[in-house]
Image (cartoon, rainbow, N blue to C red):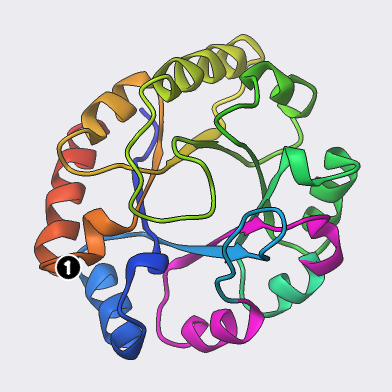
Amino acid sequence: MMKKILSPSILAADFKELGRQIQITEEAGAQYLHFDVMDGRFVPSISFGMPVLASIRGASRQIMDVHLMIEEPARYVREFASSGADIITVHLEACTDPGDTLDQIHACGVKAGLTIKPGTPVEDLAPYLDKADMFLIMSVEPGFGGQAFIPESLEKIRKLREMLDAAGLDTDIEVDGGIYQSNVAEVLDAGASVIVSGSGVFKGDIRKNTEEFMEILKKYE
């Protein structure tokens, strides 16, 4: 069985307490830290960039899971890699040449992920199955936290897992958007291996929330 991973999204954290809150998630077992970069163009919101990543890199030993919701992300791949990213995930819809962008990420010595918005058919990932180290299925529209999980995402996860299995690949499938302790099991059942949660981790008791997620995830290993 694939290892199941929790990637708390700091978009939902309290930034005046960010270092401490990150450390709590690490102590409670979260292996990754999800870092949402928004440019105000590919998505309506603007979030944070390289200086924040470089700063928190020193506060955690977690894998820095960087999700670029920006147009033509190849422009910034090198900078994010040098700022501490371990995985850089780009949007299929934002790249003129997705395959070349994935190659550029790998050339920086970090893992490459590829993601699609809810409205993009999962079949569009087919040409890149052997090029990415992780695929991210967005289960909400990218750009805002706190949205409800889109139920149709489950079928996309199942289909992508079938596509990977048929190609003989055990690549991680990450899922991001509207995931809480109450619905994470169905996401795992569909074939996901990396779970992103913002509000589900950072709203309320962070340690307890993280431990509850980890308890569920460990049942699937």
Q: Is residue 100 above or below residue 158?
A: below
Q: Is residue 181 above or below residue 10?
A: above
Q: Say which residue label 1 marks.
A: 206
Q: Is residue 108 above or below residue 141?
A: below
Q: Count residues near mark 1 (Cα–Cα under 10 Å), then give few for <14, some for 14-19, many for 20+.
A: some
Q: Residue at x 17, y 42 (%)?
A: 181
User: In the rendered picture of this protein, how many numbered marks are placed on residues?
Assistant: 1
Percent coordinates x, y for residue 92 in the rendering: 74, 38
The magenta-colored residue range is 49-76
Q: Amino acid at mark 1?
A: Ile
Q: Is residue 141 above or below residue 207?
A: above
Near-viewer residue (11 or 146): 146
Q: Residue at x 61, y 63 (%)?
A: 38
Q: Identify the element where label 1 is drawn.
A: helix
Q: Residue at x 14, y 58 (%)?
A: 209
Near-viewer residue (153 or 22): 153
Left or right of 24, for residue 53:
right
Instruction: Tell me where residue 81 sits by quadrant.
Output: bottom right
Percent coordinates x, y for residue 221 in the rendering: 27, 33
Left or right of 139, for residue 17:
left
Q: Residue at x 59, y 69 (%)?
A: 46
Assess whether residue 67 is covered by the magenta stretch. Answer: yes
Q: Residue furthest front?
A: 44
Left or right of 58, for residue 110:
right
Assess whether residue 9 is covered by the magenta stretch. Answer: no
Percent coordinates x, y for residue 203 in the rendering: 19, 64
Instruction: Tell me where residue 61 sits by quadrant.
Output: bottom left
Q: Quadrant of the N terminus?
A: top left
Percent coordinates x, y for residue 69 in the rendering: 65, 55
